[in-house]
Image: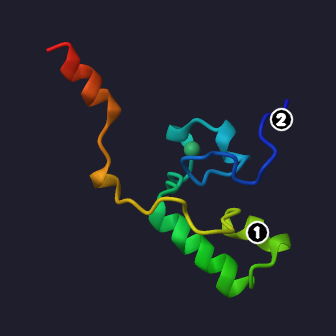
Amino acid sequence: MVLFSGKHPCLWCQVTKDEIYVDPRARDSPSLSRDLDTLKANLKIFTDIYHSDTKQQSKAMNVVDEVFFDIPIDQVIKQRLLVYDLFI
Ligand SMILES: [Zn+2]
């Protein structure tokens, strides 16, 4: 049974649909995470190399536009800490 149809189905990393069925500890190399830097790099590939041709977007991890929020991750407050503070 095939659960994933996209070439890179994971929202958090760049694992391929073939690799996603393999135990992460058994993969040849760890999958790169999807973060703001990789999204920007993939958008640059889409615009500069593939000239924003949507037929080629899968070659740029389907990144076709700017990110909505460009906030460094170290400036984000984890919600879990706020809940934890209520019980102290
Ligand atoms: Zn993943």
Quarter occupied by the N terminus? top right
Relative height, residue 2 to residue 66 (above, below): above
Tell me, yes or no, whether the two marked residues, 2 and 1, touch with CB atoms within 8 Å.
no
Give coordinates of residue 23: x percent, y percent.
58, 35
State the CA–CA distance, disc 2 to disc 1.
22 Å
Query: Which label is found at residue 57?
Result: 1
Give coordinates of residue 5: x percent, y percent.
82, 45
Relative height, residue 30 to residue 70 (above, below): above
Give coordinates of residue 75: x percent, y percent.
28, 53
- Label 1: which secondary element: helix
For the point 66% across and 41% down, which residue is it? 20
Query: Mark 2 packing: few (<14 Cα in 10 Å), some, or many (20+)?
Result: few
Identified by mark 2, the residue type is: Val
Quarter occupied by the C terminus? top left
For the point 63% across and 78% down, which residue is it? 45
Query: Mark 1 packing: few (<14 Cα in 10 Å), some, or many (20+)?
Result: some
For the point 73% across and 69% down, which residue is it? 59
Q: Earlier in the sequence, mark 2 or mark 1?
A: 2
Give coordinates of residue 71: x percent, y percent.
38, 59
